[in-house]
Image: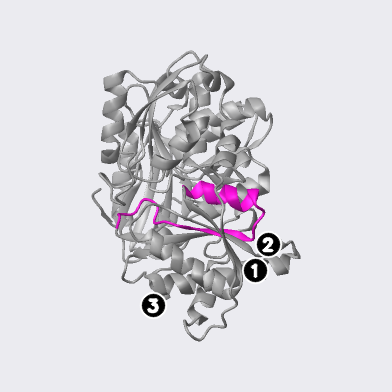
């Protein structure tokens, strides 16, 4: 049964079937065993390294799921540090601030309200995913049986870290915004998720922010719109608010506030890769010569901007597990994905929607021109966006693609990337569906359309959005 809820990067499914409190207890057992064994293997015997942070989001099922998870952890004999109803990045902060063995956020992120799940991290908020420990957690959870377990009565403590978290974040905000000498007028759509709590806790005292709040109420555990800012329809409210109020920019968060999408002063969504190019240029002023990590689907302009800024471009596979590892390995100050996840060294190499908002606020506050003009220099190419194709033989299609374009430069960091000079593409296989995902870029819209049409017979049946 647990195979239905354990995914590549986290544990997630519909509630209460197949994910319920009994599964949550077993996950607690598996997490506690894995994290304490990992600490012992790493030779860290500090008392806090038998402590496990637990947070939760605002979904109706999250209180009972968190309680069952915590009971499983305590029954194993570990100590639970409950940080309450928080955004996912707060759990990452708490793991590091309290120097714990790891932590779990109870959340289903951008999924609809009838989903729930668990995001697991180990010490230093390092990710636990497939290939980095999640399969061991699953093995241990499957072996745990309620009633048969030896109960070792671990303790539970509640810790309120909002002040420490706020102070940590506001130290990164431009001083002119903090003291009000530079005022920013913005719209924020919290998607009825955890940004509705976190944004107010962090920014209510900031003199230089004038905020139009949209969907901040998260008391019902329901969503006015799907809490997925990647879907353009979900940006309608924030776009309208920015245009109506002639605001500086807008931001829309996902359900657990670990990612966001930005719209410029015209209400136009800003591509996350182009935003990363601008943020990387800014970061390289503070960290000359640094590495910058980017998702391999990103526009060529990202790599070009990093090199032009004197930095070192570092490609990464798609997914937070890989991005966080690359940031840690290269000591990069920042990294980003097309999905709206932005990663920061000063957030322990983790992704944070609130920290990304601060980076954008700093960018706008430090420049005279509007956000659209800041982004314009990086709009050098035309992109297809991610296109999905139904394909019964994914490996066969990949092989056929490589054969047809054998003259193109080919890399296989994540799926296959082909660079034909005038255009390039990446094709990745879905882990869970019979789908291939295509991203293609070229100098002109006509060339993008021509190449997509040329690739379509190889990749399968195009799936409508």
Binning the other alpha carbons within 10 Å of mark 1 as few (below 14), some (14 to 19) or many (20 upward) gives many
Residue 88 tag number: none
Specify which label sits upstream in the sequence, 1 or 3.
Answer: 3
Specify which label sits upstream in the sequence, 2 or 1.
Answer: 1
User: Which of the two residues, 443 or 36, is positioned nearer the viewer here?
Assistant: 36
Question: Is residue 368 located in the magenta-colored stretch of the structure?
Answer: no
**Contact between labelled residues 3 and 1, with CB atoms less than 8 Å apart:** no
Q: CA distance from mark 3 to mark 2?
A: 31 Å
Horizontal and vertical percent for residue 5?
40, 68
Q: CA distance from mark 1 to mark 3?
A: 25 Å
Viewer-side label of 1, 3? 1
What is the secondary structure assignment of the residue under circle 2?
A: helix
Q: Residue furthest bottom?
A: 148
Horizontal and vertical percent for residue 302?
51, 34
Residue at image position (64%, 53%) is: 124
Report which residue position mark 3 lands on. Answer: 1
Specify which label sits upstream in the sequence, 3 or 2.
Answer: 3
- Decide if residue 338 is on the left or right side of residue 127: left
> Is residue 421 among the parts visible in the rendering?
no
Report which residue position mark 1 lands on. Answer: 36
């Amino acid at each position: 049964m647990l195979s239905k809820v354990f995914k590549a990067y986290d544990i997630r499914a519909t509630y209460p079937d197949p994910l319920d409190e009994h599964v949550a207890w077993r996950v607690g057992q598996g997490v506690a065993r894995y994290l304490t064994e990992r600490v012992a293997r790493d030779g860290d015997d500090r008392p806090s390294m038998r402590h496990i942070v637990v947070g939760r989001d605002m979904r109706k099922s999250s209180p009972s799921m968190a309680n069952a998870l915590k009971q499983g952890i305590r029954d194993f004999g570990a100590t639970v540090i409950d940080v309450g109803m928080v955004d996912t990045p707060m759990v990452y902060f708490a793991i590091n601030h309290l120097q714990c063995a790891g932590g779990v956020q109870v959340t289903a992120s951008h999924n609809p309200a009838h989903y729930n799940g668990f995001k697991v991290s180990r010490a230093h908020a390092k990710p636990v995913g497939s290939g980095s420990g999640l399969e061991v957690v699953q093995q241990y959870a499957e072996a745990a049986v309620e009633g048969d377990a030896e109960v070792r009565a671990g303790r539970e403590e509640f810790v309120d870290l909002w002040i420490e978290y706020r102070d940590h974040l506001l130290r990164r905000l431009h001083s002119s915004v903090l003291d009000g000498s530079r005022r920013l007028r913005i719209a924020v759509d919290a998607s009825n998720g955890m940004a509705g709590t976190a944004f107010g806790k962090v920014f209510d005292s900031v003199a230089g922010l004038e905020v139009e709040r949209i969907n901040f109420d998260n008391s019902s555990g329901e969503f006015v719109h799907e809490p997925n800012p990647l879907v353009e329809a979900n940006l309608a409210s924030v776009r309208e608010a920015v245009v109506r109020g002639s605001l500086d920019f807008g931001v829309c968060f996902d359900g657990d506030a670990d990612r966001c999408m930005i719209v410029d002063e015209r209400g136009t969504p800003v591509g996350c890769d182009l935003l990363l190019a601008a943020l990387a240029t800014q970061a390289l002023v503070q960290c000359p010569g640094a590495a910058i990590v980017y998702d391999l689907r990103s526009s060529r302009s990202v790599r070009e901007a990093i090199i032009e800024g004197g930095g070192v471009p570092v490609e990464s596979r798609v997914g937070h597990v890989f991005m966080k590892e690359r940031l840690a390995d290269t000591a990069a100050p920042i990294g980003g994905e097309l999905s709206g996840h932005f990663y920061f060294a000063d957030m322990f190499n983790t992704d944070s929607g609130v920290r990304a908002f601060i980076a954008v606020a700093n960018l706008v506050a430090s420049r005279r021109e509007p956000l659209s003009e800041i982004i314009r220099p990086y709009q050098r190419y035309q992109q297809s966006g991610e296109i999905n194709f139904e394909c019964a033989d994914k490996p066969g299609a990949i092989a056929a693609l490589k054969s047809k374009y054998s003259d193109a430069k080919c890399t296989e960091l994540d799926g296959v990337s082909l660079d034909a000079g005038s255009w390039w593409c990446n094709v990745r296989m879905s882990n869970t569906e019979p789908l291939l995902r295509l991203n293609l870029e070229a100098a002109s819209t006509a060339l993008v359309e021509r190449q997509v049409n040329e690739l379509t017979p190889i990749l399968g049946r195009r799936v409508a959005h």
